[in-house]
Every structure is written in structure tokens, then in C-alpha cells.
Image (cartoon, rainbow, N blue to C red):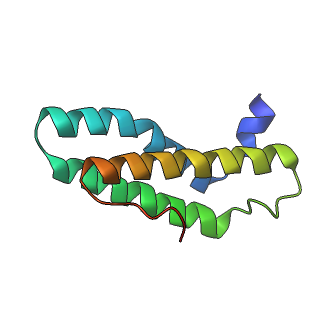
Amino acid sequence: MESEISTLRSEEILLSRRLVEFPSILDDSVSTFSPHKLCKHLHSIASSFASFYENCGILKEDNEIISQRRLALCEVTSRELKLGLEMMGINVPERM
């Protein structure tokens, strides 16, 4: 397990942290009627994902375990961004 953690790049760690924070940010935004908090966090997730995508090989990664882990990060990012945007009344395209 420790060797798997040591292979994490800083971009993966930052994106993972942003994704883990999402539920509490969503709860806080809803309970305090503060949609700007959710908007700010979605922007943070999108920025972290852009850095992750630019710096971490996903499909070109030789190590299958790392590639699968990064694909999972992409999937979770997609779901959280979609949920957050829909909560704010913004339609999300299926493909870009």
C-alpha cells in the first residue's frame, strides 16, 4: 500500500483532496443558502483536474494499476462536476 501511495503525483493528491471535500462543501452550500461556495469549489475541482490531466498520463501510462486509478479519478471528477452544476441549474453536455 505504501508503494502505491508513493507513486501518487502531487496533481493526483490535490485533485483527490478536492473531490473528498465536495460532499461537505455541498452540504454547507445548501444549508447556508450560499451557492457561491459550491461554485467556487466546482471551479477548484475543474482547475485541479486541468492540472492533473495536463501532467499525468492516463491512457498512455504503462502501469495498468496507475492508469486505472487515474481513470477512476476522471470518473469521480465527472460525476461531481455534473452533480454540482445540475444543483446550480446548469445543463451539462454529455461530451466535449
Residue at x 24%, y 54% (from the top left corner): 89
Residue at x 29%, y 38% (from the top left corner): 26
Nearest to the observer: residue 82 or residue 70: 82
- In the rendered structure, the answer to whether residue 21 lies left or right of residue 87 reads right
Q: Is 81 placed above or below 53 here? A: above
Q: Position of residue 92 (x, y in %)?
A: 40, 60
Nearest to the observer: residue 84 or residue 90: 90
Q: Is 1 placed above or below 58 here? A: above
Please tell me in which quadrant of the rendered image residue 85 appears.
bottom left
- In the rendered structure, the answer to whether residue 77 lies left or right of residue 28 reads right
Residue at x 32%, y 51% (from the top left corner): 86
Q: Position of residue 79 (x, y in %)?
A: 49, 46
Q: How many marks?
A: 0
Nearest to the observer: residue 68 or residue 66: 68
* Residue extending farthest left: 33
Residue at x 27%, y 56% (from the top left corner): 40
Q: Is 58 placed above or below 67 here? A: below
Please tell me in which quadrant of the rendered image residue 34 appears.
top left
Q: Give the quarter of the figure containing the N terminus.
A: top right
* Residue extending farthest top: 1
- In the rendered structure, the answer to whether residue 14 lies left or right of residue 84 reads right
Q: Position of residue 77 (x, y in %)?
A: 51, 50
